[in-house]
Amino acid sequence: MGVPHLGCTCSVCTSTDPRNRRMRTSAVLAVDDQTLLIDTGPDFRTQALANGITHIDAVLLTHSHYDHVAGMDDLRPLTRYGDTMPIYGSPATLRDVRQRFSYAFEDASDGSTRPALELLPVTRRFAIGPTWIVPFDVEHGTWTITGYRFGNLAYATDASGLSVESRRTLQGLDVLVLDALRFRPHPTHFSLAEALAVIEELRPRRTFLVHMNHDIDHASVSAFLPPGVALAYDGLCIEV
Ligand SMILES: [Zn+2]
Ligand SMILES: [Zn+2]
Ligand SMILES: [Zn+2]
């Protein structure tokens, strides 16, 4: 939902700490001279403007929930030179995208502009230019969605479980980006305690928690996180 939650006047939603203002979860990777975008949520345009993102080579989608794909149409100006934007995701995610943004795949002979999306389903290790990427399954309630490993960095948002095979894929990480929604358990997201248990098992060198809701006050929760674990915040930039 982003923080502040609409209509909420709790202490986090009314906090003056900029780290308590959270747009929908997304990330950009600058790797091998390429700019890769993970998810195009409803805040994508604002996020791109705020962070000086002027070029994207490809998009990787984790799943088709609104908060991860709603900004897809805003890719349009980034494909203005007649190129198509490569969109990677699981076959199920891309099926949903094709349905949700059906006009983008219709005949453009009426002269109207539309985002030129090239849907590229992935189920196993693949390359974008020189960059190798390993997709892995992430349990998101009853859905199976997609996480991605790039070298020793892995990104797993909207996670409520990780299979044995996925845990194997997540060994030896320098950086893990992991979902932690709130304190109480939730049917489709890790709670903070559940995320910390996964981190303790996988032992990445550093973990950044994402997708937090308004239960999580950045300063007070940061104070009791174990070494190597931090809450991400909008605009956070890390080098791996
Ligand atoms: Zn609130
Ligand atoms: Zn989701
Ligand atoms: Zn989400």
Image: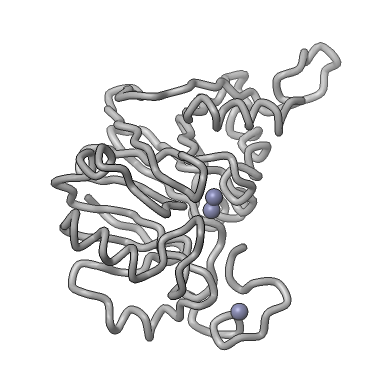
Note whether residue 204 is visible. no
Q: Nearer the viewer, residue 45 or 220?
A: 220
Q: Residue 234, image x and y in percent?
A: 46, 63
Q: Is residue 141 depicted above or below 131 in this figure? A: below
Residue at 60% x, 22% y is: 81
In the rendered structure, the answer to whether residue 94 lies left or right of residue 153 reads: right
Q: Residue 179, image x and y in percent?
A: 40, 58
Furthest-right residue in this view: 110
Q: How is the image coloured?
A: one colour
Residue at 42% x, 52% y is: 159
In the rendered structure, the answer to whether residue 70 lies left or right of residue 180 reads: right
Residue at 55% x, 26% y is: 85
| Quarter of the N terminus within the rendering | bottom right
Q: Is residue 201 depicted above or below 230 in this figure? A: above
Q: Nearer the viewer, residue 137 or 212?
A: 137
Note whether residue 173 is visible. yes
Q: Residue 80, image x and y in percent?
A: 63, 27
In the rendered structure, the answer to whether residue 180 lies left or right of residue 227 reads: right
Q: Residue 49, image x and y in percent?
A: 57, 53
Residue at 56% x, 57% y is: 24
In the rendered structure, the answer to whether residue 116 lies left or right of residue 17 reads: right
- Snapshot quadrant of residue 227: bottom left
Q: How many marks?
A: 0
